[in-house]
Image: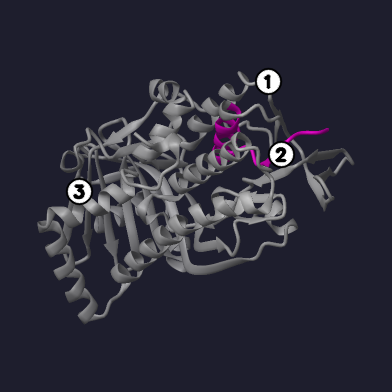
């Protein structure tokens, strides 16, 4: 089968890219995924995988005409962020300081993907296929070929890797990655608290790692992301619900006692970035290009900006009658997004290292820094504008 572009990975990032490109060009687009999307959104239950959706990502979804449907189903807005360390030094951010009604939303991944899946059906130029298992990749003079396990051959001028952190397509294109293992595991679950969360996203940096409470639409329900050393996480996962609840309440009492409202899930934590975002006829977006620690809630937002930026670069190339699949065109995308992503990843890593240190000098410096930053509005506002996507250098779909 022939297409102009093949997207490998039918997740949120891959579908967003396909939609963005279909709205700006007449290119034929094939989306292939190894798995059929069966994890449909359930209005009666919260899915354990949620993401913090920044204002820039909201604007991308608005541009793609899917935001209203997402919002009508279930979104959980937050208006404040409260961060503190184990000894009580604190900094707070609020939406009013940057003239916004809120700072972002906590939204289930399955909900966003379900809405995007429905939306692509409105575009006949997008052809979705799953399950598809790819076994071989071949570069040709004027195109590339992807061969499936049942020996079908898909040809295209460009392939986009949206197939996650262990990207098959990235490996086939022989693009190396730089990885740093945090030797931590994140535990995620929904937790019911005695006190209402008041639409405040809270995060405490404990000696073992950060613990975040992300507010859901139910005023007493939050999604937790608890980063812990691997051995500690295994021990906490082995506890019964009563034991886990007691342990959680010991380290986090801001909302009074918390009890599990869902099963517990876990995933390993590491930082990873591809040495190159592009190669001949291949471009990487989302987790295929970069993986970041969840403490700042930026992973999905970075991926959505990748998707919107690559679609914009391709559309501009076509508009100016340039080869959209050429390495020079793709490198424009790489320069744009790798610089932005690298800055974000470095910032998050510095924050993690700074808060994780148990050295007295660092703790004293950290306390002074938090206290000073909390008092100087300009510093706080610059930081939060960067995080929510109220800044320069964004793709057109994400701009006001």
Q: Residue at x 45, y 28 (%)?
A: 63
Residue range of the region highlighted in magenta in the rendering:
1-22
Q: Give left or right: position of 3 versus 167.
A: right
Position above or below: 65 against 186: above
Q: Outermost residue toward the left?
A: 375
| Rendered position, 385 above or below 14 | below
- Residue, x 70% and y 38% (percent of image)? 5
The front one of 146 and 191 is 146
Q: Nearer the viewer, residue 399 or 41?
A: 399
Tell me how far mark 3 sits from mark 2, CA to CA: 41 Å
Secondary structure beneath label 1 = loop
Q: Residue 9 colored magenta?
A: yes
Quarter of the image for the C terminus: give it: top left
Image position of 22 with respect to 97: above or below:
above
Could you give the CA–CA distance between mark 1 and mark 2, rounded to whole angstroms? 15 Å
Q: Position of residue 323 (x, y in %)?
A: 69, 43
Give the quadrant of residue 345. Answer: bottom left
Q: Residue at x 55, y 67 (%)?
A: 179
Please state which of the two labelled residues, at mark 1 or mark 3, is closer to the viewer.
1
x%, y% of residue 3? 76, 34
Q: Which residue is mark 3?
A: 93
Q: Earlier in the sequence, mark 1 or mark 2?
A: 2
The residue at the far front in this view is 320
Q: Indicate which label's residue lies in the foreground, 3 or 2.
A: 2
Disc nearer the start of the sequence (3/2): 2
* 95 vs 88: above or below: above
Which quadrant does the N terminus fall into? top right
Q: Which residue is mark 2?
A: 6
Residue indicated by mark 1: 124
């Amino acid at each position: 089968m022939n297409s102009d572009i093949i997207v490998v990975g039918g997740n949120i990032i891959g579908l967003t890219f396909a939609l963005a490109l279909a709205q700006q060009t007449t290119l034929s687009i094939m989306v292939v995924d190894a798995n059929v999307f069966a994890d449909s959104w359930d209005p009666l239950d919260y899915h354990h995988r949620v993401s913090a959706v920044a204002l820039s990502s909201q604007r991308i979804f608005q541009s793609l005409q899917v935001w209203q449907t997402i919002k009508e189903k279930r979104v959980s807005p937050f208006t404040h962020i409260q961060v503190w360390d184990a000894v009580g030094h604190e900094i707070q951010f609020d939406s009013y300081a940057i003239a916004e009604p809120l700072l972002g939303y906590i939204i289930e991944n399955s909900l966003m993907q379900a809405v995007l899946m429905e939306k692509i059906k409105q575009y006949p130029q997008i052809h979705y296929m799953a399950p598809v298992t790819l076994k071989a990749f071949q570069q040709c003079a004027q195109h590339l070929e992807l061969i499936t396990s049942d020996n079908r051959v898909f040809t295209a001028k460009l392939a986009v890797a949206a197939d996650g952190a262990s990207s098959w397509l990235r490996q086939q294109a022989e693009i190396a990655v730089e990885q740093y293992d945090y030797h931590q595991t994140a535990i995620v679950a929904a937790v019911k608290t005695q006190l209402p969360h008041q639409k405040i996203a809270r995060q405490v940096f404990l000696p073992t790692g950060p613990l975040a409470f992300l507010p859901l639409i139910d005023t007493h329900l939050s999604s937790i992301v608890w980063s812990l050393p691997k051995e500690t996480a295994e021990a906490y996962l082995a506890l019964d619900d009563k034991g886990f609840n007691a342990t959680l309440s010991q380290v986090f009492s801001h909302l009074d006692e918390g009890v599990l409202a869902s099963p517990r899930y876990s995933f390993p934590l590491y930082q990873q970035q591809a040495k190159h975002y592009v190669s001949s006829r291949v471009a990487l977006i989302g987790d295929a290009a970069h993986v970041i620690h969840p403490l700042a809630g930026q992973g999905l937002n970075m991926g959505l900006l990748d998707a919107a930026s690559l679609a914009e670069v391709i559309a501009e190339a076509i508009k100016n009658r340039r080869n959209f699949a050429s390495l020079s065109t793709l490198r424009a995308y790489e320069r744009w997004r790798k610089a932005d992503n690298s800055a974000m990843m470095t910032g998050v890593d510095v924050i993690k290292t700074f808060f994780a240190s148990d050295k007295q000098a660092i703790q004293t410096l950290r306390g002074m820094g938090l206290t000073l930053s909390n008092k100087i509005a300009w510093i706080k506002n610059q930081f939060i504008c960067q995080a929510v996507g109220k800044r320069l250098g964004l793709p057109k779909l994400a701009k006001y």
